Image (cartoon, helix red, strand yellow):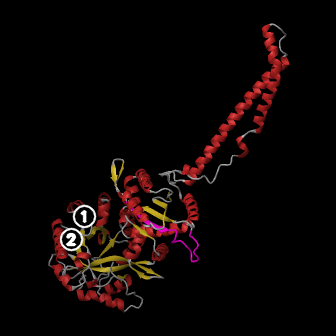
Amino acid sequence: MTKTSFAPGNRRDRRKPRIGNAERDVIALGIAIAAIILFVGTGGAVVPQVVRSLTGYGLGPDKVLVNALLLNIALIIFGWRRYRQLLEEVEQRRNAEEQARILAETDSLTGCLNRRSLNAAANEMLAGMEGRSKRLAFMMIDLDNFKRINDFNGHSAGDQVLQQSAKRIEELLPDGALLARIGGDEFALVVPFEKSRRQVIDQLATAIVANISEVLEINGIGVEVTASLGIADDEMGRGADGSPGDAQTLLHMADIAMYQAKKQGRNHYLWFEEPMESELRFRSEIETGIRRGIPLGEFVPYYQQQIDLQTGELSGFEMLARWNSPTLGIVKPDIFIPVAEAIGAIGELSESLIAQALEDAKEWDPGLTLAVNISPLQLRDPWFAQKLLRLLAEANFPPHRLEIEITESCLHENVGVARTLITSLQNQGIRVSLDDFGTGYSSIAQLRSLPFDRIKIDRSFVTNLIENQDSAAIVHSIALLGQGLGMPITAEGIETGEVMEQLRKYGEMKGQGFLYGQPQPATVIHDWLSDHKLLDQPQAAPASVTTSDANKVNTAAEDKADTPRQAGNA
């Protein structure tokens, strides 16, 4: 099978090296030819004299002619050697120019084409498709979670994954297809197919996704990698006047489809559709807004109450992020947090919010705690604990009043890193809880080996506690597990009095949810705490709040015209 993907030498050479007159040295060649002519003339006179002299029939040759003959021989040798050296130099130059061309057009790691050569070759193919029965499919392939492979296995293993993935893709390509590596872990394909056989591209895409997902053996270790794939064809790129699109436009469409495939769960493919571009444009606006909004202080903490279910006392607040966007209004974290993680801004965003929350919370009653979620990406930061301690020192906030919440997915990615971080934080007096328990991959063995201070039951179980017996059984089991391991429990998502009463039957635990009010900004919380004498002042009363009193925080928020009402739970 002949393909133009891994055989750059087989491609039609559009840029022949121009050696020009350097392929022959006229002077050296002229000297050699002149010397040969003189040698023939001089030799014709000298050689007979030498022969007759040696046979004893005549005098010796003329010394001048002999010297001239020897000089001719020397000139012939000089000219020939110079000509041979020149030919070698020309060959070296030709090889160097060919190597430079290959390096300029191909990816050195995988041998595929690169982005620049792909665009040129694809545009040639597009020009050749006009008036024919064939069409071109443009595919973008991105390896899922490739950075994690590099981080956990090293860049050498990552390079081998790229090489093996490229080879697996190449094995499936039909004749005339182009394969290029255009980014760190991104590949692009251009595949010709018959207009009436679009299913061939679906079959190829399915096979590529399946082929890449097979476990790779790298340095004796099994490495799992999957791929997301997007597809567009040349008909999609036509303008309003019917003019054909160019390769860059079609690859952009395929890239949009690939992003959607990744967003919808990865490890599959999608064809480009027009609405996808609008969604991508919205994401681009979100990215730009995040980068602009962090230094401008547009991201602000909201607070949700945490109540002791047995006594009804207010025990603290959980900080929830909100984006006060000048164009989008109040944006919930499920919109901007994944984007901030994807663009690498989650660390700066989280530190900004935590700093604001610590300043707010240090005015509260000393008995009230502050709970803060961290992203799984922050867990990989070896300096996170030190950064957090710096924020505590700057705010002069007691570490024992701060609780860091880690989701179960963090444990699945790297238990060792989680253990190191938890121990480091606890050594400084900070408490650490396991968030969203029951939805991930935690085991009892992990709970015993990791020194968590608290378990938080995921809201998906608590909300359906009354209607769903399975949810009730799970919540009850987690409560018993917490009692057995000596870990306090917090239940999220309490929305009705019935759920609260049922949870009280399971023993001591904290609770939070809409029953106790919507999350509110710092100004509303401050005023409400002031009304209940729960700010840090000598005459502060005990932090005891009934459910009825807790609901008044929403009423207080309604009385403030500048407080958005669309803020919800996260």
Secondary element at tag 1: loop
In the image, taking residue 207 as reference, residue 84 lies left or right, namely right
- Give the dominant element type of the magenta stretch: helix, strand or loop: loop
Query: Residue reaching furthest top?
Result: 56
Farthest residue, direction bottom: 559
Answer above or below: position of 285 versus 146: below
In which image quadrant can residue 144 be found? bottom left
Q: Which three-letter amino acid code belongs to the residue tagged 2?
A: Pro
Mark 2 Cα within 10 Å, few/some/many (few <14, many 20+)? some
> Residue 93: image x %, image y %?
64, 43
Image x and y of residue 42, in percent:
82, 22
Q: Is residue 344 visible?
A: no
Magenta-drawn stretch contains 240: yes
Of 202 and 291, nearer the camera is 202
Amino acid marked by disc 1: Ser
* Secondary structure type for disc 2: loop
Q: Residue at x 57, y 77 (%)?
A: 240
**Which residue corresponds to the image point at 52% horizontal and 55% vertical from the top-left?**
113
Residue 536 painted magenta:
no
Q: Is residue 456 left or right of residue 211?
A: left
Front residue (pair 33, 161): 33
Total marks placed: 2
**Residue 499 falls left or right of residue 125:** left
- Which residue in the protein does label 2 denote? 488
Q: Residues within 10 Å of mark 1 (few under 14, many from 20)?
A: some
Q: Mark number for residue 442?
A: 1
At horizontal 17% and vertical 82% (from top left) the residue drawn is 501
Q: Label 1, label 2: how many angstroms apart (C-alpha)?
A: 17 Å
Badge nearest the viewer, 1 or 2: 1
- Relative to 375, say whether 275 is above or below: below
**Residue range (magenta):** 226-245
